[in-house]
Image: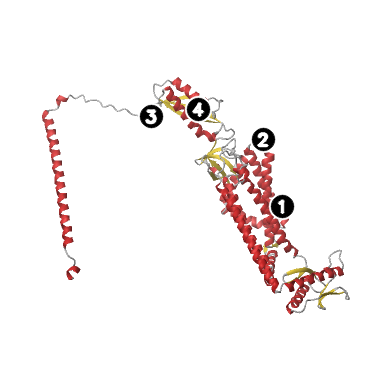
Amino acid sequence: MYVWNKKQNVISPFLVWLLAILMILSFMGFFCPILAQEKPTAPIMLEGRTLFYVRESGQYTAEQRANEANRHLGKILDSGDPPAVVGIDSGQEVPVITINNRYFLSVTYNDVPMGKSLQGQALAWKNTLEVAISKAEYERTLKYYIKAIIIAIAVIFLAAILSWKLGVIWQRWLKPLSTTPTDSNTPTSSSSSQPLSGYPSESSFKFQLVALLVLLTIIRGIIWIVAFVYISRLFPQTRRWSDLILEILQISLITDVFPLGNQKYSVLDFFILIGLLVGLVTLTRMVSRVLKSKLLTATGLSRAVQDTTALIFNYTFIFLGTIVVLQVWGLDLSSLTVFASVLGVGVGLGLQGIAKEFVSGLVLIFERPIQVGDFVEVAGLMGTVERISVRSTEIRTLDQVSVILPNSRFLDSEVINWSHSSPISRLKIPVGVAYGSNLEIVRNLLIKVAKNHQDILSMPSPQVFFSEFGDSSLKFNLLVWISKPYKQFQIKSDLYFKIDSEFRAEGIEIPFPQRDVHFRSSDVPSQNISPELINSLSNLSNSLATWLKENSHNQTRQDKNKDIQSNKVIKKENSTPNEDDISH
């Protein structure tokens, strides 16, 4: 059972949907109120809570009206008078809301939305004020403070439990997946020994686990932030501070401070641009994946053609989509001429290496000297091409190691492409036999061994050539044709094993380089040597042996004398008393 099918392959959609939901909620909960502030309105607030919004009226702006009303509300609560009474004075030209029979706010035509009357709007504001004042007076009591403290403790406890549960999910469910062994029966491509592109690699899975760990950490941080913000909203004093911080943050986001061309942009504008570009890249990858897995697969094209087509579509769609996004975002592309000229200078100076790899990648993509799935040999590396991008090419070696090579390496150096135009290639297996062997039997055995191997093609048929008479062997070359170049080393090994077995069975010897040395006796007769010379040599030999023996005895005697003298010196030193002992 393949592990990816049940566990790993679920992580990618989960991450995409979870991030999308978080981004949508963040936009709805935070950015929408910011955008709403662009209208000419100002809020009427009490203890950090927004009650309703007012608009400008005559010579008074919305901000002036709201500040005066908010100051009046604050004085009423701080005075500690009996419960405030909210009323409506309809005797004026427009309804006037009063608090304790004092003027509070006039309801103008600008404050009334479409389809509603002045009196109805005044009554709605009156009810809102009564509920808000009653609630604010209750929040200043000791009973409410005790209740708020209990709620705050419960919220902290709940946040701690949720954070701990997310940690348990990582430790028990997700972290063990990083050590889960993959199945040895992973489906592979017919043109390479690598897994099919539809099955994620182990490195991709590890990256997804790291991304999921980061996402869980962010979620845990959001839980604690939401908990502390909620607690700060429970108490009137902390509520004011949190509103001030949010107001400062909102102003910093919507204020235009970054000049670009003839316009200025805010931090929020750049966040929106980044979100649009991320959405564009995500959409492009999804469409490219669907194009490759559904449409291109049905056409019956090779894997290399499918990958090249999908790659061209991917970069073309991103390029055109980026132009459209920048136009929708409000950027005049003509204002980027200076930036484009600076970028050109940078490419010519500091980025020429990247530019070189980019151009090389385009050449590889369109000229296609190598394709995805080809078995190549470059710079001493042999492996299958797994991916070709505009900057680098990934090669999976026979040791199952991914090597990332710059694209220029394939244009600047010699490349052996075993799969170019056709994966069929010829192998040469040199064999040597001893002199005196039956050459016809040798030839038949080599042909037999080659034909019995399942990875060797029957057409063209195997051939045996007698190459030369060697120093110690008769040399042959067995020529066979294969359609799987990535298995050439395994095929050679199998053939050598089988050839050795067959030769042993037939008694054919495989020689190794050796030399025979023959010593011939002298032609000079031994009786020509005089007896005097023989006696002289014998006496000289005996004298030399005697001298060596006496010399060894003398050396041994001298060594013994030295040992005796050293022992006497040591005993004498030990028997001499110390000066301290004499003084005592």
Chain-order first, disc 1 or disc 2: 2
Measure the C-alpha gap from mark 4 to mark 2.
33 Å
Q: Which mark is residue 512?
A: 3
Measure the C-alpha gap from mark 1 to mark 2.
34 Å
Q: Which residue is mark 1?
A: 324
Measure the C-alpha gap from mark 3 to mark 1.
74 Å
Measure the C-alpha gap from mark 1 to mark 4.
59 Å
Tell me the element at label 1: helix
| Up/down of 357 relative to 507, above or below | below
CB-based contact (under 8 Å), mark 4 and mark 3: no
Chain-order first, disc 1 or disc 4: 1
Residue at (53, 44) in percent of width and height: 403
Chain-order first, disc 3 or disc 1: 1
Tell me the element at label 4: strand
Q: Label 3 neighbourhood size at 10 Å, few (<14), some (14-19), many (20+)? A: few
Q: Which mark is residue 300?
A: 2
Residue at (17, 58) in percent of width and height: 571
User: Label 4 sits on what residue type?
Assistant: Leu
Q: Which residue is mark 4?
A: 479
